[in-house]
Amino acid sequence: MDFKKLKEQIETAAKNAFLEMYEKHGTENIYSFALYSDEGAMTVCPSSNTLETLKGIDKDDEVYYKFEPAEWTYEMEGADLEFNEICTILRAELARHEDKSEDEYDKWFIEFQAELYTICIEVLEKLKNENFFKNIIGKDIFLIFTVSDYEFEKQDLKNIIVRLNDNEYKSEYLDWMETWGN
């Protein structure tokens, strides 16, 4: 698989998804953007949320809904054609390796999955460092990469949050993480 090309496709799709969300929902005060995948590494999807959608949420649940992309209002919205094409490419690559022995496939898959996840994080980091989001909406936003039905090790998740956020969201998220399991 050409991971360099895949990374370029994900970057373009992420930019287009955010621009589409801003065009459609910019007046709702967008504060977040995420890329997420699944444990089977078959998908990459965008997600975004707005402060407007958080207004009616119970205070006890507010932090969860603020930071959990699966709960965001605009999950899997934006640059639909581009993200569908990326998902098709991923599924085709997975299918291409199905006839390997179980051990060979498992070894290959772990590397493939790790590379996909790394690319998604690198794309978000690149866009943050280029001030892509800030240049569009005039402020920093919360960025995260997550995987549905999968839990990162706590330290790995902290590293993702620190890497992608140089703003008040970083400390708020890390403080929230300290309450987990308590």
Image (tube, rainbow, N blue to C red):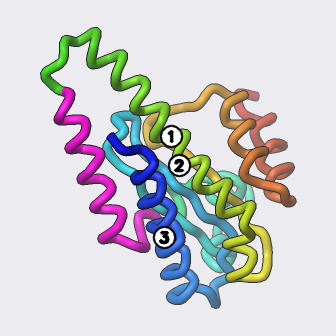
Q: Does the magenta stretch include residue 109?
A: no
Give, as a three-letter code, the residue at label 2: Cys
- Rendering coords of residue 102 (x, y %): 23, 12
| 81 relative to 168 in the view: left or right | left
Give the secondary structure at mark 3: strand
Q: Which residue is identified by label 1?
A: 117
**Does residue 63 appear in this view?**
yes
Q: Which of marks 3 and 2 is nearer the N terminus?
A: 3
**Badge number at residue 64:** none
**Does residue 55 appear in this view?**
no
User: Badge 2 local density, few (<14 within 10 Å), some, or many (20+)?
Assistant: many
Nearer mark to the viewer, of 1 and 3: 1
Cα gap from disc 1 to disc 3, whole angstroms? 21 Å
Please identify the quarter of the rendering in which residue 165 is found: bottom right
Please identify the quarter of the rendering in which residue 99 is found: top left
What's the residue at 29%, 45% (across, down)? 90
Nearer mark to the viewer, of 3 and 2: 2
- Rendering coords of residue 88 (x, y %): 24, 53
Asked if the residue under mark 1 is in contact with the one under mark 2, i.e. CB atoms within 8 Å, the reply is yes
Q: Which residue is identified by label 3?
A: 74
* Depth order, front residue of 149/11: 11
User: Badge 1 local density, few (<14 within 10 Å), some, or many (20+)?
Assistant: many
Cα gap from disc 2 to disc 1, whole angstroms? 5 Å
Q: Which residue is identified by label 2?
A: 120
- Rendering coords of residue 122 (x, y %): 61, 48
The span picked out in magenta is: 74-97
What's the residue at 65%, 76% (across, down)? 30
Q: Is residue 90 magenta?
A: yes
| Magenta stretch secondary structure, dominant | helix
